[in-house]
Amino acid sequence: TGKKGAESKIVVLGNAGVGKSALVVRFLTRRFIWEYDPTLECTYKHHTTVDDEAVTMEILDTAGPQYTIHREGHVRWGDGFVLVYGINDRHSFEEIQNIKQYLDDIKKTNLMCVLIGNKSDLCHERKVSYVEGQNLATDMACAFYEISASDGGEEISELFHELHREIKRRKQM
Ligand code: GDP
Ligand code: MG
């Protein structure tokens, strides 16, 4: 049926300060908000169109200290995961592997994620190369985008849409 797969639950994960909220708000409003309550955890319901199909995306923007990103309930709830690090923050990049491991432990199979290197506008502060991001994405068998939530651009919508397509494909299998 046409309805099936038209919903997806997406969880945004990554260390504090990498720009998760900025990214989600940019996607939903096309605006960049400089300051965003770092403790606010929020689920947005977003109605949009992907490939001419009406789609509802629920997006969970996670927050809080490190250990709270490891919340089993979030992981079970989600169909797909946006894993975010900052290209100027080596530690946030290294943390991605731990998050991925945690997801694998809970989901076991068919884990769908995209890897995002955010803050590409801060190239003068770069601590993680593009190729390193690409290699990690290859290891995790997922798509990779370097983006800037502050500059915006098409690829921010594209990454959410692509994840939705993946989720839909998987649900139909
Ligand atoms: P979160 O803790 O992962 O939700 O991160 P936030 O979205 O709250 O962003 C943390 C800080 O990074 C804020 O001061 C944002 O303005 C800033 N920020 C987020 N995305 C970008 C970006 O693409 N470029 C730059 N230069 N700053 C960003
Ligand atoms: Mg936040």
Image (tube, rainbow, N blue to C red):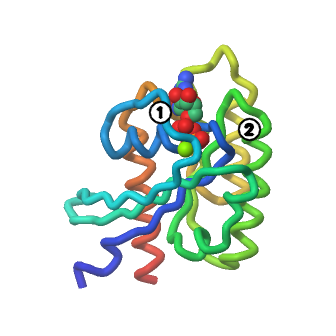
Given the image, on which type of amino acid does mark 1 rest? Ala
Q: Nearer the viewer, residue 112 or 94?
A: 94
Image-quarter location of ligand 2: top right
Image position, residue 81 (x, y; %): 56, 60
User: Could you say whether the residue bearing mark 2 is in a helix, strand or loop?
Assistant: helix
Res 146 seen here: no
Res 99 seen here: yes
Image position, residue 64 (x, y; %): 65, 50
Asked if ligand 1 lies within 8 A of label 1, the reply is yes
- Residue drawn at x 69%, y 59% as measured from the top left: 68
Image position, residue 163 (x, y; %): 46, 59
The residue that label 2 is drawn on is 132
Given the image, on which type of amino acid does mark 2 rest? Glu
User: Could you say whether the residue bearing mark 1 is in a helix, strand or loop?
Assistant: loop
Relative to 91, 56 lies left or right: left
Relative to 157, 84 lies left or right: right
- Residue drawn at x 20%, y 60% as measured from the top left: 52
Q: Quadrant of residue 8?
A: bottom left
The residue that label 1 is drawn on is 149
Task: State which tag comes first along the sequence, 1 or 2.
Answer: 2
Q: Quadrant of residue 100?
A: bottom right
Distance between mark 1 and mark 2 Cα atoms: 20 Å
